[in-house]
Amino acid sequence: MRVEHIYRYPVKGLSAEAMEEVALRPGECLPHDRIFALAQGDSAFDAAAPTWMRKTNFACLSANARLAKLHTAYDPKTGQLAIRPPDGPPLVADLRSAAGRALVEDYMTEFMGEEARGRMRFVDAPGYNFTDIPQKSISIISLASLAALERAAGMRLDPLRFRANIYVSGGLEWGDFDLVGQEIQLGGARLRVWKRIVRCPATEVNPQTAERDAKPPRVLHEHFGHADLGVQAEVLETGRVAVGDALATLTTT
């Protein structure tokens, strides 16, 4: 299999950023992946003592499809976050300052309306990633498996509906499930694939239109007897991964 796309999602629920290459570190997520989140007004998330919490405590596509209307870009060198709405000028804020974060909070609270459940908080915590599972992983999707789902659904499904880190071509349809329990070489990094990814209502949202125009979990259940697409992998050894690199199996357990 071959790496076709690499993506990170700096702010949970907001848009993807394409990468040509990335350095992976043992036991960590993709660098700058889901390092920020917008805590709902009634969320009890405490940045001073962070513990894993369900996605519903934060702005997320499964509950807030309107998030897909926003296009965002984060520059880790300058700490600036740009948010571009469908109409009007973008917001550019310096996340290193309290004033910059307050701008984002005000903007997103207004944008979300009642879905904000109060005033939103722009949150992060050292070493913490706002992932849908407690474990730090790299998500990988086989484009061959996605193609099988598209045929069953009778429509094209933008890969970004599934918000994976790595998209690979080649291999058999659903062959990526056979990687569970195995170690793989991904570019220059070594990983262990440890689980399949169960898909949620977030995948119903078209990332281009913000409309719920498909039901991938239901199609998966009806045609394949499960709701899974893609796998999670733990990084075991440091290495760089670039578009065009190979994914190869190392061991079977």
Image (tube, rainbow, N blue to C red):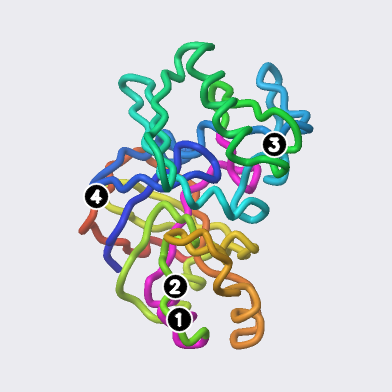
Element at badge 4?
A: strand
Asked if the magenta segment contains residue 132, the reply would be yes
Q: Place residue 113 in its image quadrant.
A: top right
Residue bounds of the magenta highlight: 129-152
Residue 150, numbered label? 1
Badges 2 and 1: C-beta atoms under 8 Å apart? yes
Q: CA–CA distance between discs 4 and 1?
A: 26 Å
Instruction: Tell us which disc is closer to us: 1 or 3.
Output: 1
In x, y percent, where is residue 151?
45, 87
Residue displayed at 41% across by 67% down: 158
Q: Residues within 10 Å of mark 4 (few under 14, many from 20)?
A: many
Badges 4 and 1: C-beta atoms under 8 Å apart? no
Give the residue at the far left of this rendering: 244
Element at badge 3?
A: loop
Whichever of labels 4 and 1 marks the residue nearer the N terminus, that label is 1
In x, y percent, where is residue 155?
45, 82
Residue displayed at 60% across by 79% down: 220
Type of residue at label 4? Ala
Give the residue at the far front of this rendering: 88
Q: Which residue is mark 4?
A: 242
